[in-house]
Image (cartoon, rainbow, N blue to C red):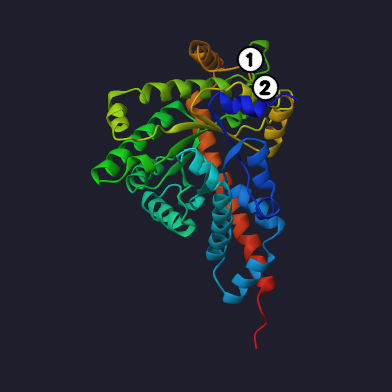
Amino acid sequence: MTDALKRLSDEGVAIWLDDLSRKRITSGNLAELIDQQHVVGVTTNPSIFQKAISSGDGYEQQLADLAARKVTVEEAIRMITTADVRDAADILRPVFDATGGQDGRVSIEVDPRLAHNTEATVAEAKQLAWLVDRPNTLIKIPATKAGLPAITEVIGLGISVNVTLIFSLERYRAVMDAYLSGLEKAKERGLDLSKIQSVASFFVSRVDTEIDKRIDALGTDEAKAARGKAGVANARLAYQAYEEVFSSERWLALDKAQAHKQRPLWASTGVKDPSYKDTLYVVDLVAPNTVNTMPEATLEATEDHGEVSGNTIAGTYEQARAELDAVEKLGISYDDVVQLLEDEGVDKFETSWNDLLKSTEAELQRLAPSEG
């Protein structure tokens, strides 16, 4: 069998797993993925934790202990999720050491209910970094308007950040600006810039899902020709923006201070439309210094039949721009789509978090020791 995952890694794409659970940690599955499938990082989000903890697998004893202490449901969730992230970070520590801190990272997200509150997001990021207490953690902050100044402040404190829920090219440029501003703050404070890492999570499949839905509503042959192209085109133009920003004079001054580029991370890479190849958002987005965070099904599909044939982003910018323009010409507003996706992304994570609160509260009540 051809080793597509190794070829992907050799092309400069870091393979991260978009999933985490206690069972994955304790069974040795995560260590196996690192050892055998070139996985060098892990991302989590509120939906992933909601699914893992609601399954109950491996959490019973900790929940019983938390119930005995009569902690609040918010504290219980923080204790459970940070324990998983800490343990995963320890498993990935050899990768972190071997890559000089670039990979071997585990991401944990700030409470999604704080997405529109800058001050609370900064406070939560500091708290999470302190709680997990591992150098190979990334704190996830959504790229909302309130998130941008939070990113600058948190990076400025020397905390490494995964910026999440990026859909638009304009917002992505603002994210890179926030990162550079944070590095400049950190430099002013005398911090070691070589210790700060960041990725910018640019979401891919959701763009196609929303635009394809609008194309299907139009129903014309001209519209149908544009199906399934916008997600990859959008991400490729994001990489063009990355190349521009990280070759600028402003960046070069930080580069001299040993700062790291903020790598683009392709997120939402599981294919939603079964008529598309299941490796689409992996094999069509191969370029140096990128991360692709995959659900396990996408990882397995890529390993099994992914065709990795070198850099698939270089030289595509003109075509990518034409493909996004074609969508606009159909009367589908790019700005409207990306704003809707950001709003929905925050709402989905908040819903998952609220579901997690409810299910955990029910477990704490069930396990609470009887009075007397």
For mark 2, does the 10 Å Cα neighbourhood hold few (<14), some (14 to 19), or many (20 or more) residues?
Answer: few
Q: Which amino acid does label 2 sit on?
A: Asp
Give residue 52's position: percent from left, percent from top. Answer: 67, 53
- Whether residue 302 is visible to the viewer of this picture, yes or no, is yes
Give residue 192's position: percent from left, percent from top. Answer: 32, 44
The N terminus - image quarter:
top right
Sequence-wise, the earlier of marks 2 and 1 is 2
Contact? badges 2 and 1 (CB < 8 Å): yes
Quadrant of residue 146 within the rendered picture = top left
Along the line of sight, the residue nearer the viewer: 268 or 106: 106
Residue 82: give its label. none
Quadrant of residue 13 within the rendered picture = top right
Q: Residue at x 43, y 52 (%)?
A: 125
Compared to residue 159, the image places residue 178 above or below, namely above
Residue 223: give its label. 1
Mark 2 and mark 1: span between their CA atoms?
8 Å
The residue at which mark 2 appears reads as 216
Q: What residue type is labelled 1?
A: Ala
Q: Residue at x 72, y 58 (%)?
A: 57
